């Protein structure tokens, strides 16, 4: 599977779960900043299982780690699902469905 296909399948799943996979598009930065809700986010860099990070990406990821950011290098949909499940973050859709009928 190509890097683009991996990114596409993961982003479709993230959006279905109610998360926002924001495309970054800056050289050396991870591919996506995934907005999880409740003020939380993670970064995702997509690679094929054989893919390697470029030196600029290694440097950027190290700098993000230094300031406490969470970055995942993702090689499959299943891997991304595993990472998100490990964060114990409820889907924004479940939170929304719990509150949508409440009145102030």
Image: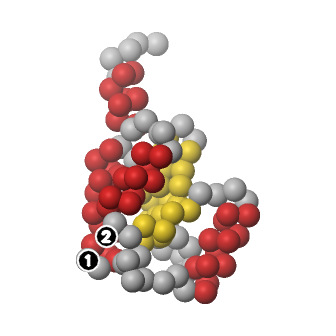
Report the residue at 35% width, 31% height from top: 94
In terms of depth relative to the viewer, which is nearer, 13 or 1? 1
Q: Are marks 2 and 1 in contact (CB under 8 Å)?
A: yes
Residue at the top extreme, as displayed: 103
Where residue 7 sits in the image (x, y, percent)? 34, 68
Report the residue at 33% width, 44% height from top: 17
Residue underneath mark 1: 1
Residue at the right extreme, as displayed: 66
Residue underneath mark 2: 6
Q: CA distance from mark 2 to mark 1?
A: 7 Å
The crowding category of the residue bearing disc 1, from other C-alpha atoms within 10 Å (few below 14, some 14 to 19, many at least 20), is few
> Which type of secondary structure does the marked residue at label 1 adopt?
loop
**Quadrant where the image shows the N terminus:** bottom left
Image height of 101 relative to 28, above or below: above
Q: Is residue 79 left or right of residue 72?
A: left
Report the residue at 56% width, 62% height from top: 71
Residue at the bottom extreme, as displayed: 55
Where residue 23 sits in the image (x, y, percent)? 44, 65
Question: Is residue 14 shown to the viewer in this render?
Answer: yes
> Which type of secondary structure does the marked residue at label 2 adopt?
helix
């Amino acid at each position: 599977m190509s890097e683009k296909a991996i990114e596409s399948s993961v982003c479709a799943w993230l959006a279905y779960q109610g998360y926002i996979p924001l495309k970054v598009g800056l050289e050396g930065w991870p591919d996506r900043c995934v907005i999880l809700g409740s003020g939380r986010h993670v970064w995702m860099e997509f690679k094929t299982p054989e893919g390697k990070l470029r030196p600029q990406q290694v440097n950027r990821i190290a700098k993000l780690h230094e300031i406490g950011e969470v970055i995942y290098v993702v090689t499959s949909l299943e891997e991304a699902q595993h990472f998100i499940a490990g964060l114990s973050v409820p889907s924004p859709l479940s939170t929304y469905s719990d509150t949508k009928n409440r009145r102030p």
